[in-house]
Image (tube, coloured by chain):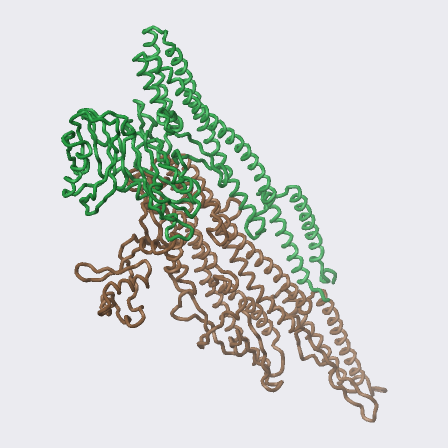
Amino acid sequence: MSFFGLSIAKSGLFAAQKALNTIGHNIANANTPGYTRQRVEQVATSPLSSPGGRGMIGTGVDANRVTQIRNEFLDIKLRTENTVYGQWEYRYSSLSEVEAVMNEVGDGKIGAVMDDFFSSLSELKKDPSLPTARAVVKERAIAMSTTISQMHSQLEKMLKDTDSSMEATVQQINTYAKDIAKLNEQIYSAEMDGSSANDLRDNRNLLLDELSKLVNVEINEVSQGSEAAGKKMQILVNGQPLVSHNRVDLITFQDPKPQHKYGEDLGLKYDVRVLKFESGTIINTNALKGTLKAQLDMRDNMGDADGPKGIPYYMKKLDEFVSTFTEEVNRIHMQGFGLDADSTGKLFFTVKSIKADGEVTANPHNPGDFSPPNDGATDIAGFVSTFTAPQTEADAVAMWESKYKGYTIVKDGGGNWSEVCDIKKFVDSNTSEEEAIKDWEAQYKGYTIMKDGKGNWYEVKNITAKDMKISEDIEKDLDNIGAAKTYDQEYKAKVGDNTNILDIIQLRHKDNMFEWGSPEDFVKSLTTNLGADTQEAENMAINQITLVQQIDNTRQSISGVSLDEEMGNMIKYQHAYNASARMITAMDEMIDVIVNRMGRVGL
Amino acid sequence: MRITNSMMVNRLMMNMNNNLKRMDKIQNDYNSGVKLHKPSDDPVLVARSLKLHTDIRENDQFAKNIDDAYSILDKTETSLNELHSVLHRVRELTDQAANGVLTNEDTIKINAEMKQLKEQIIKISNDTYVGRHIYSGYKTDQSYLKDNGSNNISLEKEMKSDILNAPITIPAAPNNKFELDVTGIARPDGTKYTGKYTVELTNEVYGGGSSKTIDDLATDIQNKLNGDSIELTKNTTWGDDQLSTGDIVSVRFEKEVDASSIQDVKDEIEAKFGAGNVTIETKDNKFFTITMNTNVDTTTPIEPTFSIGSISYKDGTTNSAEVKFTIEDNDPSKEPGQDYIPLEERDFSVTVENNQLIIKNPKIQDNQKFAIRSMNDGLDLKKIGLVKVNISESNEKLEYQIGISANLSINVRGDEVFGPVVDSDEDGIPDETIIDTMNELILHLENGNSIEISNKLKEIDVHMDNVSKIRASVGARTNTAETVKERIADTKVNLAKLLSQTEDTDMGEASIQLMTYEAIYKASLNIGARIVQPTLVDFIR
């Protein structure tokens, strides 16, 4: 008889105690996010072999390891899907915002204000002499202009906000990266002895889950050579390490901020953030995924070549609508006659600049653009002077005119040369006015030419949605609305003539005004496009969240704490503990017998 | 599969959330009455609904337009009816007066009533609809006739050719001339032009691969109409008039003749009438007035044209063309040449639109008509795109939009109603207006000339027929307006129905759905409450 039995019972006591503690820990963390249930691994301790082949004697239980019950594969799967979810979720919420800005359902915005505008024209058409009808046209045009320009500036603000929220996303990624790096170090040192830092790992896993929603990450646990040396974690973004064990390479922005890809096109007055690693490595945004990518898409993408359509696409479309629509209205309106003397050639909508035939250009063409032998000259006089006999100044002028169609150079009394616009000449040199206009637009992007009722030509720079408003002429004097095509000797409209208004009204059904058709078709197509995009994003986000939840559920099924189970185990280990305690009592009694009562016969 | 409590709770929450979302959508549809709230709800339906909204708004505008059009046409019809009855009364009175058995007193009474009727016609011509003159074309702010019956305004008009068929060959002289007649065109003061333009074209092929295009033909005709090669003659045949002492005949050049040529011109003229028979006077080197010193016998007609070797003009050009005489009224108060359109008023524009030649002259102050006539059989006017007698038409049409690319003309122009309808000199060009007829009637009544009065009966009939014709056309337009109005109302109902089908919530369906979702939601709450509550904990003592 020895104390061996006590020692076995003691190990049972300890094991049960440990298990009960772990159960307590599990129950306490039943609702902790990211918590993985733990279990005490029990093994029978090494048995003693009795000499002489009389079998082996058990020595009790060993319960040193506390392990997590976890399927790592599900983590990887969840994170991949979570990245996709993050991307669609942001895209959906962002597109919903665009939808709210456009608000094109039912009595929608652009469609409705445009209808109102045309209705007012129709009223004016009935009686062009009526000042109230003219006033209504003006007000409706203002309403249309403000609606569209406001819409445009709202979109622009959205773009700017998206840029800011991208910064927030990057900061969040960086915070996660730093936290993970810290945890990496803790886990590594905690696990030096081969144990498992369960709760720290839970924390890290939770951070990784969150991080995976923001950006696509590749997580590697790199073995350090031997089991004992443990593993070091590496998190890659685009194949570039964001976190290598305890070191981080944070994401920052290029400084100074570069211009938006389409900044000039969209007339943006601010620059945007462009990602890079702190170490200097550039981030290839095309390969990114997650919320960050969705933000970049919304901020940057215009055409199909850029990927999913972003805010610039809608801004550009509004610009396209405004520039074509105002141009067409202006072109017709300019040829009309108002109620005042000489009131033709008035613009209806304002434009950026207007240049009459013969007016000096603000920025002349560069004489240096000519090919040899006349190159090198930086001023027009210098260019002309390169023409030496038998070539004359007239040759220089002819060359200029043939290179810059519609422009010519003239010499003033003082012998100074300057460039002037000669649209009439340009138009005359073309086969028809339509051809001339097309030709001009092709040569000078963003500019077009139009003529007034007297046949004078002007060069006009188109406006974008942001600048849409009615012209000062109309703003100041309603009589400037050119309803008539016929006029009297003073170039004053015949008051009852409504033919020019009719032409403007007919724009409503001009099927070839846009690639998408008439103005209302354009609005319709834009709305359908937006609707389809948003719907896609919504469906994708819903599908993806379902998938993520599904995987999470499976993960929960493995790692989650079940109270029933824990209760069962509690009873189990409680009984085990009781039993072990009972064993001690039994042993105690046995020793008592040996120590106190044995050999006392006859005492 | 192992099920944990939190899993069950999560799933329960998720499902409940989905239930709530569905219920929220349904109840939003239910409360707002529409099922489309944002484009992504259903992009296809949203596109259709946008289109329908636009169509409805446009249709509403058409409805408004048609109501206005209807009122104006109604007003015009009333006005024309009134005019017709006035003309009817005029005819009755004329008939009575033409009998010639009336006493002087009766005639005076008739004349007084006639004057009243004339005033009434002028008043009718100034009829307005909400302040806009209905007969004044685009000049809705001015009345068509002045109080004295003369024209107050001019309506722009144009002459349109037939469709041109290229190539067009202009034959060689003398078969290359045509005549543009502006006879009957009145000035604002009521006096009339009586001139004719002879237009001589060049033997040329236009269009069809020729170096000259149809546009060149238009340019050529325009230059001829406005240029100095146009000669003016009085609208009378030479030889009809006896030139007696004191008569003034004039020669007019289009440009000032150079001083060196003046004597040549005078010599030629004098030779034509016989030396000493005439006194030739120069007015501003353009007019030469020839006063007859003796009676000149024109029974053997002197050709009203003669050639001068070569005339040098002040601007340096020369011309050897024929010079034509103009016989002027010898009323000394009248400026010679007044009956013709002076050069500065000749602002003809000839353009090609849709393969038609359009001749316009905005400067002619009139509401009248001009005509084109072939001078000989050689020039087929049809071929060059000008029909033989083509009455010009004002293009001052007021149109209301009553449908997509459907317009209804709602005005009747004064020149159609009051303008020249009667062709008194039977030259194919109407030259007498209602007011002209009235004035003459009054004059004849004053003179008691019953034969002339009865001659006027025919003219009154022509005017009445004309008014009836216009009334019929207005009536037809009113009918159109009515039909279209009905159609617009139908369209509105159809569109509203379509819109309702597209975007309205089906209330029955929605309420059943809502009930279903509610039942599901309640059930899930019920079950949830049972599942979530108990754990083993509850049963361990």
In the rendered image, which quarter is residue B381 located in?
A: top left
Residue A323 or residue B520, whichever sits in front? A323
Q: What tint does the image give chain A?
A: brown
Image location (x, y in percent) of residue A484: 36, 39
Identify the residue at horizontal 31%, vertical 40% (top origin): B225
Answer yes or no: is residue B132 visible.
no
Tell whether A318 sits left or right of B525.
Answer: left
Image location (x, y in percent) of residue B363: 30, 37
Residue A163 or residue B187, whichever sits in front? B187
User: Which quadrant does the C terminus of chain A fall into?
Assistant: bottom right
User: Which quadrant does the N terminus of chain A fall into?
Assistant: bottom right
> In the picture shown, does residue A530 fall above or below B474?
below
Image location (x, y in percent) of residue A537: 57, 59
Identify the residue at horizontal 42%, vertical 46% (top origin): A144
Q: What tint does the image give chain B?
A: green
Q: Residue furthest bottom?
A: A52
Q: Residue furthest right?
A: A602
Residue A62 or residue A283, whichever sits in front? A283
Number of numbered discs on residues: 0
Answer yes or no: is residue A239 visible.
yes
In the rendered image, which quarter is residue B82 located in?
A: top left
Tell whether A594 sits left or right of A80.
Answer: right
> In the picture shown, does residue B396 fall above or below A147?
above
Identify the residue at horizontal 21%, vertical 30% (top origin): B249
Q: Residue furthest front?
A: B300
Image location (x, y in percent) of residue A309: 51, 60
